[in-house]
Every structure is written in structure tokens, then in C-alpha cells.
């Protein structure tokens, strides 16, 4: 045994495990397997015992003391300014141009106190190197299902199990298809099949690939399987001149979504409840290139969707055109016009609670031609308008599949409460969240809001708070009402 220690210490000074002599490797493999440790850990412990090198820490949950084995004291994880608990995240980097952003994601996750293990697909290595990912994660980068040493050291099953969360970023169309269909032909897909940990994917691909029915079908399947998603965002693509939905969410957004999944700070007040939320403006076409719109940013509705999902609800968010990324764990249906919004809302029913935060255009152009309206001979065009369906009122008046709580917003510039009370009665909804959107209030497009909750029982004045806090206050109030 002494000879083994001495030889090992010497070998490790200069060589990687892969380069150890076969007989040594075999003995260490057997010891490591017997002790339920990786070869690397086993060698560290041997070296610590031999006194040649200080032992590197072993996470407390994996240090399995064994008789006669020198065991290094587990090091307390460094406190992080963001999150003191050390979450274990397995990051699978897929093969897309956005892979370079995943290097920053490693840094963001580590900044937040997570330990990050990295797996890269073959295609990912065409974009970034395992060396770069390893330098940032501070550990070995796993790439090959059929690498006997890596597989014996920390195989795919251990990679799948020894993690609190798997993040797939970028999740390419191919990786999503594999996941949706249960393929397991490489390390990444095998881990994803073998894991019981929650999985968060950050899709990234060309907009055409994203909107392709096959990708959308796979996405729906993955969501049905409980996979969480973040993004993709709208914007310019890496390919010059291409724009649309398909950009990977920013590393910071992904890191925040990952951490939110790992430490659900919000009590699961709405577990098992279904919420339907509308948000954003609508665009009413005038002709193929012009439309009527309004200044709604969608921030309040998105914050409510996020808070509802965090509280455990099953959330569908029907959103008009906004510049916001899909909240994690929310089923987002994007629409343009009021009529499309109504159709999507009816499709999403039944729901326990419906919250109508969208700023739906009151009118649309009566007849929109198929061609762009030209300046010239016929003078200034006159637009004739017709009223849009009132989505809130339509749902609140339903006799079948009416949500038990129907909530509207009343954005007013004067006589806020008076107008809200009138709306409550006219639209037959249960609650109205009234707010002042006069220019001085800065609510439109801003981050703060002062709400007056108008119910049949009276008016509750909420203090001025951020739109996020309004969302959490509303979710708590709904939970009190329906549970
Ligand atoms: O525009 P108004 O002040 O009537 O909107 C009040 C509420 O009605 C909001 O909750 C809004 O989302 C909803 N609404 C709707 N469909 C419309 C107009 C408004 O759902 N066509």
C-alpha cells in the first residue's frame, strides 16, 4: 500500500489520471468504486494521507468516511453575497452560437454561490472549448459518454443524480427534439433521461427554427413533462440581417431563473390552481405595415405571471407584443390583436382565476386592406373604427366555465375610484385593481404602481410599491380569497 501511495503521489504531480499506469489506475478505480467516490477524490484522499499535498475539499454530502481511510475535513463553502447555500448545478452547453454566452452564465451562477459542473455536446465544442468552460467552472468538463475513464470516474448516472438542477443553455432545436422524444445517444441526452432533478432550458435558435411546428410541438411536450423554460428573447440574430424570436435569454436572466427554481422563496400559496393572465398592448392593423398601438409595457402582467408561477400556480399568459422575455415556468401565448387575444383566452379556459392586465385597444380599423395604403391621389385616408370585443367583460359574463375570480384593471387619469366602481358593475367582474396612469404618475412604462383594490365589499388602498410587489400582494390576496 505504501508503494501505491508513493507511486500515486509521484504520478499525480505530473500526470493526469488518464495517463496513470494501467495497474495503478485499476487499483484506484476499484478503491474509488468501493468507496462511492470519483477517482479524482480517491486520489486526493490518498495524497492527503501520504502528506504530500493538501487535500481538496469534498462536498459534505459526498464525503463518505471509511475505516482506515484518511479523510480530509470538508471545507465550508465560501459565503456568497447572493446565496449562502451551495446549490449544485449541472450546465449542459448545446451547440449553438449562443454557447459563448454560457461561459458568462457559469460565472453568473458561481457568483451566486452555486457549484457548476459542465457537460458539453460535440456540437457545443465547435463553438467554445472545454478548456474555457473548465477554466470558468473550476472543474473537469464532461463531453463523452463512451470515455471509459470519465465514465468510471463520474459516469452519466452520477452526473444526472449529483445535482440540484440541470440547466441546458443554449438548448438547440436538436437538443429539444432529443429531449422531447427521449433519445439517449450522447452524454447530454443520457443525463437528461437519467435525472430526477428539475431541468431549466434556455432555447436559442434561428427564428424560423423556433416557430417551426416541430419545435413548438417539442416545446409543448417538454413543458408537459415539467421542463422549465426561459426565453428565447426577441432581437437580432447572430446571422447578419436576421431578427425575431430565438435569441437565448441573457446569462443574468438564466441565472436568476435557475436560482429562483432552486430556492422558491414564495410559499406555494396557489399550488394546483390555474391562472389565466393577459398582458401588454394589442396591435390593431391599419394595413399590412401599420397598426394602432398603445404605450403598455406589459411589465405588470408579466410580474403577476411570474409571482403566480412562483406561488405554484399553473399559469397561461396571453401576451400582446412586448419587449419582455417569457417568465420561467409560464405557458406564454403571444398574440397581436384584441380578437386574437380573445380567441387565445377562450382557448385557455377553464381557469380558477383570470386576471386581465392587458391594455386592449378599444377600437380596430373596420376594414384593413391587403395592400399598403398609398399617399397620393385619393388624399388623406379616413379610418373608420369599430369597437373591439371586451375580453374581461366577455369572460366575466360567461355562465359556463367562468373562473371563480375574474379580475380587471382600471387605468384612469381622473376620478380613479369612481370609474373603477362603475367598471366593476358594468363588466360584472369580481375585483378591479384601479390605478392612476396620468402622466404625472409615471405608471405607464414605469416600475412602480399605486393600487386601489375595488371589490363589491369596498375599497382597499395599497401603498405605492414596485410592480413586482404589487404582483406578490395580489397573489397573496387571491390565495386568501380562494383557498
Ligand atoms: O379599457 P378599460 O379601462 O375598459 O379596461 C379595463 C379592464 O378591461 C382591463 O382589465 C382590461 O384588460 C380589460 N379589457 C379587456 N378587453 C378590452 C378592453 C379592456 O379585457 N377590449
Image: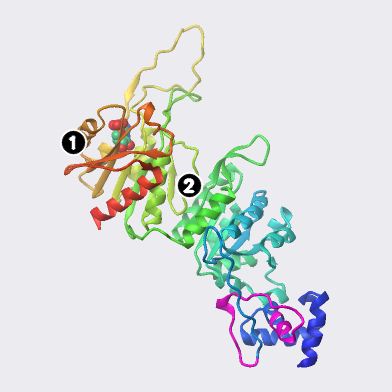
- Taking depth in this image into account, of 79 and 294 the one nearest to the observer is 79
Residue 425 marker: 1
Query: Is 82 a magenta residue?
Result: no
Q: Is residue 310 above or below residue 30?
A: above
Residue 140 marker: none
The quarter of the picture where the C terminus appears is bottom left
Badge 1 marks a residue whose secondary structure is: helix
Residue 208 occupies which quadrant of the picture?
A: top right
Let me know if residue 391 appears in the view: no
Residue 98, horizontal then vertical, whole percent: 64, 49
Residue 130, horizontal then vertical, whole percent: 72, 61
Sequence order check: which comes first, mark 2 or mark 1? 2
Task: Tell me if 321 is positioned left or right of 201 in this view.
Answer: left
Q: Residue at x 23, y 53 (%)?
A: 481
Residue 355 occupies which quadrant of the picture?
A: top left
Q: Residue at x 67, y 78 (%)?
A: 41
Residue 143, horizontal then vertical, whole percent: 69, 65
Dominant secondary structure, magenta: loop
Gap between marks 2 and 1 measured at Cα:
33 Å
Q: Is residue 369 above or below residue 477?
A: above
The quarter of the picture where the N terminus appears is bottom right
Identify residue for label 2. 326
Q: Residue at x 45, y 21 (%)?
A: 369
- Taking depth in this image into account, of 343 and 166 the one nearest to the observer is 166
- Give the magenta part as a residue range: 44-68
Q: How is the image coloured?
A: rainbow
Badge 2 marks a residue whose secondary structure is: loop
Ligand 1 falls in which quarter? top left
Amino acid at each position: 500500500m505504501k508503494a501505491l501511495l508513493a507511486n500515486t503521489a509521484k504520478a499525480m504531480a505530473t500526470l493526469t489520471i488518464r495517463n496513470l499506469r494501467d495497474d495503478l489506475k485499476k487499483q484506484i478505480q476499484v478503491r474509488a468504486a468501493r468507496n462511492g467516490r470519483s477517482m479524482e477524490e480517491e486520489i486526493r484522499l490518498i495524497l492527503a494521507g501520504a502528506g504530500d499535498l493538501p487535500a481538496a475539499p469534498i462536498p459534505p454530502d459526498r464525503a463518505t468516511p471509511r475505516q482506515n481511510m484518511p479523510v480530509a475535513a470538508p471545507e465550508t463553502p465560501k459565503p456568497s453575497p447572493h446565496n449562502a447555500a451551495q446549490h449544485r448545478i449541472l450546465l449542459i452547453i448545446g451547440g449553438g452560437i449562443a454557447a459563448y454566452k454560457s461561459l458568462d452564465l457559469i460565472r453568473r451562477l458561481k457568483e451566486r454561490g452555486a457549484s457548476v459542473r459542465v457537460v458539453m455536446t460535440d456540437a457545443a465544442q465547435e463553438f467554445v472549448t472545454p478548456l474555457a468552460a473548465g477554466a470558468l467552472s473550476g472543474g473537469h468538463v464532461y463531453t463523452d459518454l463512451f470515455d471509459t475513464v470519465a465514465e468510471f470516474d463520474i459516469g452519466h448516472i452520477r452526473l444526472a443524480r449529483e445535482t440540484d438542477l440541470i440547466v441546458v443553455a443554449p438548448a438547440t432545436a436538436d437538443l429539444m427534439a432529443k429531449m422531447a422524444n427521449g433519445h439517449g445517444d450522447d452524454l447530454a441526452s443520457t443525463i437528461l433521461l437519467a435525472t430526477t432533478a428539475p431541468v431549466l432550458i434556455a432555447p436559442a435558435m434561428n427564428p424560423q427554427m423556433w416557430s417551426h411546428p416541430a419545435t413548438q410541438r417539442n416545446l409543448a411536450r417538454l413543458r408537459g413533462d415539467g421542463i422549465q423554460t426561459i426565453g428565447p428573447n426577441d432581437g437580432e440574430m447572430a446571422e447578419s440581417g436576421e431578427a425575431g424570436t430565438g435569441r437565448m435569454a441573457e446569462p443574468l436572466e438564466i441565472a436568476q431563473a435557475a436560482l429562483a427554481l432552486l430556492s422558491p422563496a414564495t410559499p406555494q400559496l396557489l399550488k394546483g390552481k390555474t391562472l389565466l393572465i393577459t398582458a401588454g398592448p394589442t396591435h390593431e392593423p391599419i394595413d399590412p405595415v401599420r397598426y394602432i398601438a398603445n404605450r403598455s409595457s406589459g411589465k405588470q402582467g408579466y410580474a403577476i405571471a411570474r409571482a403566480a408561477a412562483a406561488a405554484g400556480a399553473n399559469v397561461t399568459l396571453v401576451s400582446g407584443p412586448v419587449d419582455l422575455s417569457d417568465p420561467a415556468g409560464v405557458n406564454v401565448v403571444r398574440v397581436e390583436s384584441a380578437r386574437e387575444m380573445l380567441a387565445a383566452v377562450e382557448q385557455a379556459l377553464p381557469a380558477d382565476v383570470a386576471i386581465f392586465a392587458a391594455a386592449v385597444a378599444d377600437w380596430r380599423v373596420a376594414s384593413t386592406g391587403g395592400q399598403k395604403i398609398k399617399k397620393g391621389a385619393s388624399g388623406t385616408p379616413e379610418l373608420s373604427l369599430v369597437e373591439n370585443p371586451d375580453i374581461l367583460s366577455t369572460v366575466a359574463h360567461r355562465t359556463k366555465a367562468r373562473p371563480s375570480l375574474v379580475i380587471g384593471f382600471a387605468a384612469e387619469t381622473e376620478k380613479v375610484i369612481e370609474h373603477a366602481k362603475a367598471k366593476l358593475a358594468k363588466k360584472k367582474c369580481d375585483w378591479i385593481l384601479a390605478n392612476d396612469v396620468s402622466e404625472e404618475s409615471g405608471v405607464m412604462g414605469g416600475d412602480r404602481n399605486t393600487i386601489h383594490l375595488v371589490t363589491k365589499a369596498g375599497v382597499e388602498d395599497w401603498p405605492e410599491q414596485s410592480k413586482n410587489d404589487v404582483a406578490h400582494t395580489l397573489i397573496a390576496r387571491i390565495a386568501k380569497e380562494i383557498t
